[in-house]
Structure formats: structure tokens, C-alpha cells
Image (spheres, rainbow, N blue to C red):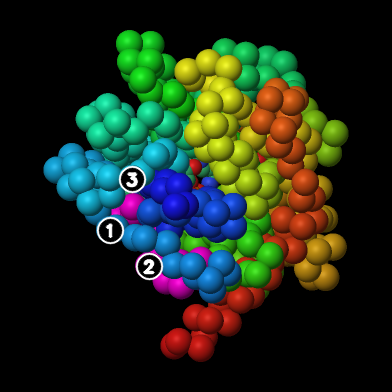
Amino acid sequence: MNKQILVTGGTGYIGSHTTVGLIEKGFDPVIVDNLSNSKIEVLDGIEEITGIRPHFEKFDLRDKVDIDEFFKKYPNIEAIVHFAASKAVGESVEKPLLYYRNNLVSLINLLEAMTAFKIPFMVFSSSCTVYGQPDKLPVTEAAPFKKAFSPYGNTKKISEEIIQDTIDTNPFIKAISLRYFNPVGAHSSAIIGELPLGIPDNLIPFITQTAIGIRDYLRVFGDDYNTADGSCIRDYIHVVDLAKAHVVAIKRLLEKEYKSNYEIFNLGAGRGVSVFEAIRSFEKASGQKLNYRVVDRRPGDIEQVWADTSYANEELGWKAELSLYDAMLSAWNWEKNYRQKGKETE
Ligand code: NAD
Ligand code: WQD
């Protein structure tokens, strides 16, 4: 029988790509999502790509009663990949309690259920946001946490601490936190990708929406940083590479290859890319000139961060393989496909 894995937030951006990755490696994923930031049609996309429709249960992980009912219905679940969370940095500043409740209560409920229902393994979605502006670049997993710039970022720091404290007193639970840098791109089929709800905050969706004509121009937030071309530097990681790392992490837990009960890995491409370089890469991949203007710095932006991925590369035997060009091309194909579908259903 295929091993059953709970994927919370599995209809979301990274969760949907990971569900595809799990199915392709012979797992039997069960998605739980409240569809607060994703659409049910994503299940059709996953089925179209893999030929398999994953199990799906719609409920809110803040509800403990629903969680208990769920695990009674699915007694064979062996591990959890926990993506479900609210993730908009700006919204978290306006509604901090919503973010603390959603991101922390959902995690606490799941950790309690793991003991109650004897599920030992969790892979948790963390973020490079826990490093703030690191003192040394590239940043390793050993770098200290910095004060979070937003309540969202703080939920990731606190979540990691909750997991650590839980495991310290309850060694039955084993977990891996994966600190993502900047996930970008889409599945090569252009059937699943990042769903643009409202005006995007993130660079790549804003670029593709500008190129397709929904936005007039991209605002480049500052060209006076202390970097080679003056714009900020990030580590953009293709979502398909990211998805593969989750499958590796799940196998590591199930096959008991972990070195300690709680492990943490950076997931990035290991390369710093400036905003101008990202624009040039998009222009090359899409064959389109991008309309952009340099404006003031965005409050809260850090200047530069990229990952030292050597620990993940050596320990997980995983490495980002897809390029920035691949990411831009897939993001552009996804944008075009998504808009085309929208027109067809109008
Ligand atoms: P997403 O919003 O596309 O996916 C999250 C999914 O969780 C959504 O489908 C949403 O409907 C669901 N969800 C939210 N709260 C829920 C709840 N209480 N109960 C059930 N379902 C709920 O986000 P994503 O980009 O796929 O991110 C996945 C995870 O990775 C999140 O934890 C996010 O914080 C983390 N992360 C994302 C990024 C990024 O830039 N995308 C970077 C670092 C870390
Ligand atoms: C990337 C670069 C901007 C938009 C955020 C969260 C972080 C993590 C990933 C979850 C920056 C510049 C952007 C635009 C621009 N998420 N930019 N014009 O800020 O690195 O990280 O997403 O954990 O927590 O903070 O990503 O895509 O918003 O920005 O010039 O319209 O692009 O200044 O340098 P960021 P981003």
C-alpha cells in the first residue's frame, strides 16, 4: 500500500507542487485545506498532471474537533507536511492576531494530534525571514534568529520554537523545518502555479502580471542599496526543486535517516540575484520588454540575503537543479495559461 501523507495547505502554491512530487514518488497524499487562499480547481490540475486525484478534506486546522474527526477517518497517515498558514507580510502587520491564531493554533493542534493519533513525523514550512538581515552571507542554518520584521515572520520563529520545545519533552515526535528562501516559478505543464489573489506583493507575480498587461509597470523598490547594481538581492528557488526537497525530507523521516529528532535545512538555489538581474532574466525567458520604474525603497525590505545550501546538499542529497531562467519561463507560461483559462470561462 502506498504510504499516506497528510499535506496541509495542499491546494496552495507550494503544497500543490509538493503533492504532485509525492504522487510521482508513489505516496498517497491527503490534502487538508480550508481554501482561504487557494481554489478547489487545483485538484483538477494535480489530477491532470499525475493521473491521480488526491484525497481532499476541506476544513480549518484551527478547529481541533475537525482535526480529531479527520485522523479518525484516515488512521493510516504516517507523516505530515504542514504548509497551511497565512503568508502575506503586509496583511500580518494590519491583522497580527489573525496571523498568530492561524499560524500558531493550527500548528499546536497538529502537534497535539500527532501524539494522540501516534503520527511521529512532520515536515514544517519555515522561511529565511527568521534570519532578518544576516551578519554573514551566504547564511547558514547556524545563524541566529533576528528580530522579525512582521508578525508573519514572527509566527515562523515562534513555530520553530514550539516544535523544538515539543520535541525536547516528547521525543516520539521527529520534525524537519525547511527554511525556504524565495519560492518562484510553476510546474512545467503550466497547469498549476502561484494563484494571484489581489495585487501581488511578490516580485515574480508582479513581473508576469505587468508583462501580460494587468499592471502598468513594475516598481523597483530602490536602486541605492549597497549592492553591485543598487537593487536588493534574494535567493530565488524554483518551486519544483522546493517540492522535491519535501519528498526527500519525508523519506528521510520515514526511513529514519535523520541525525536528530529535530533538523533544520535551508532551501535555496544558493545564489544571490538582484532585482535588475531578475528583470533581465524574465525578459530573456519571455521575449518581452518589461515596463519598470525605480521608486523609493520598500519599508521593511532587507538589503540582501542568500542561502548557504551546503548542509542541505550534503545531508539531504538534494540540490536545486532548475535555473532562474527556467523559473521565469515557467512563471510566464503559467501566467499566460491562467489568463487564457479565465477568458475561456468568462
Ligand atoms: P499558499 O497561501 O499558496 O498556501 C497555503 C494554503 O494553506 C492555502 O491553500 C490556504 O487556503 C491554506 N490554509 C491557510 N490557513 C489554513 C487553515 N487554518 N486551515 C486549513 N488550510 C489553511 O502559500 P504558499 O506560498 O504555498 O506557502 C506555503 C507555506 O510556505 C506557508 O506556511 C508559508 O508561510 C511558507 N512559506 C512561503 C513562502 C513563499 O514565498 N511562498 C516563503 C517561505 C515560507
Ligand atoms: C523580492 C525583491 C523587493 C516587488 C517575501 C517575504 C518573505 C518570504 C518571501 C514567506 C525585494 C523587490 C518586489 C515589487 C520590487 N515569504 N520587489 N518590486 O520581500 O524577499 O520576501 O516573500 O516566508 O517572508 O517577506 O519577496 O518577492 O516581495 O521581493 O522591486 O513589486 O523584489 O524589494 O528586493 P521578499 P518579494
At a point 81% along the width and 64% down the height, the residue shown is: 285
In the image, 284 versus 187, the foreground residue is 187
The magenta stretch spans residue 38: yes
Q: Evaluate if marks 1 and 2 touch, with contact meaning CB atoms under 8 Å apart.
A: yes
Residues in magenta? 32-46
Where residue 108 sits in the image (x, y, percent)? 28, 29
Name the secondary structure under disc 2: loop
**Which mark is nearer the camera, 3 or 1?**
3
Residues at marks 1 and 2, CA–CA distance in whole angstroms: 9 Å
Measuring 79% from the left and 50% from the top, which residue is drawn there? 323
State the CA–CA distance, disc 2 to disc 3. Answer: 24 Å
Q: Which mark is residue 40?
A: 2
Q: Are marks 2 and 3 in contact (CB under 8 Å)?
A: no
Quadrant position of residue 132? top right
The relative height of residue 265 versus residue 210 in the rendered view (above or below) is above
Q: Residue at x 63, y 60 (%)?
A: 186
Q: Is residue 182 left or right of residue 108?
A: right
**Total tally of numbered discs in the picture:** 3
Q: Looking at the picture, which amino acid does disc 1 mark?
A: Lys
**Residue at (73, 59) in percent of width and height:** 328
By secondary structure, the bulk of the magenta-drawn segment is best described as: loop
Q: Which numbered disc, 2 or 3, marks the residue closer to the eye? A: 3
- From the image, which quarter does the C terminus lie in? bottom left
Report the residue marked by disc 1: 58
Residue 280 vs 321, above or below: the answer is below
Q: How many angstroms separate mark 3 from mark 1 (CA)?
A: 19 Å
Q: Is residue 236 left or right of residue 78?
A: right
Label 2 or label 3, whichever comes before in sequence order = 2
Mark 1 or mark 2: whose residue is earlier in sequence: 2
Which residue position is annotated with label 3?
Answer: 76
